[in-house]
Amino acid sequence: MTIAKLIAGRGTEVWSIEAEDTVADAVAMLATKRIGALPVRDGGTHVVGIFSERDVLYCLDTRGTDMLTLKVREVMTAPAITIDPATHVDEALGLMTRRRIRHLPVEKDGVVIGFVSIGDLVKYKIDTIQAEAEALRSYIAS
């Protein structure tokens, strides 16, 4: 299955933050939306980085609470690793594993059209395995 098919049922809105926003703004958005990461944009549609819970922890450890006044661009993980909608789910999982990341923006022609987490991909894989197991049980029983 491709990422395009995986995100097809979702809405078109992708929450993001601007690079010039403060870390406090980004943390508030993570908390309000109950999400673990945000694509970071630099005034346009292209993603320049990712701001995640890990970035908050690393920065908090090194800068203390003063980090809340920093710009997101000073704290984000950059450059962003992105994927194309035609990417296969297994390929995206492999990329996440190799690069030790948990979120991937989905870009088409330089525009973010989706955002997937490792949880999204693992859920798809588990659902697929369970469906295959049920089909085999059904086949064996008949």
Image: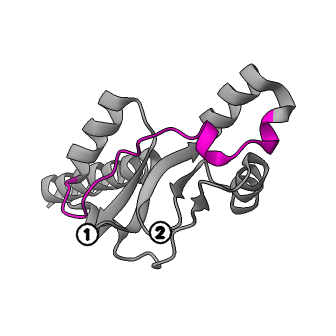
Q: Say whether disc 2 or disc 1 marks the residue closer to the N-terminus.
A: 2
Is residue 58 rendered to the left or right of residue 66? Answer: left
Is residue 120 rendered to the left or right of residue 90? Answer: right
Which corner quadrant of the image does residue 120 belong to?
Answer: bottom left
Name the residue at 79% across, 49% down.
Answer: 24
Asked whether 12 or 8 is in front, the reply is 12
Point out the residue furthest to the right here.
65
Residue 117's disc is: none
Mark 2: few/some/many CA within 10 Å (<14, 14-19, 20+): few
Mark 1: few/some/many CA within 10 Å (<14, 14-19, 20+): few
Which element is circle 1 on? Answer: loop
Q: Position of residue 16 (x, y in %)?
A: 57, 62
Position above or below: 36 against 106: above
Which corner quadrant of the image does residue 54 belong to?
Answer: top right
Read off the residue under disc 1.
Answer: 109
Q: Position of residue 62 (x, y in %)?
A: 73, 20
Read off the residue under disc 2.
Answer: 44
Position above or below: 77 against 25: above
Q: Main secondary structure of the magenta part?
A: loop
Which stretch appears magenta? Answer: 67-88
Name the residue at 27% across, 46% down.
Answer: 92
Distance of label 2 from label 1 (alpha carbons): 13 Å
Is residue 121 rendered to the left or right of residue 30? Answer: left
Q: Position of residue 35 (x, y in %)?
A: 63, 54
Q: Amino acid at mark 2?
A: Gly
Which element is circle 2 on? Answer: loop
Name the residue at 41% across, 42% down.
Answer: 79
Is residue 122 rendered to the left or right of residue 91? Answer: right
Which corner quadrant of the image does residue 91 belong to?
Answer: top left
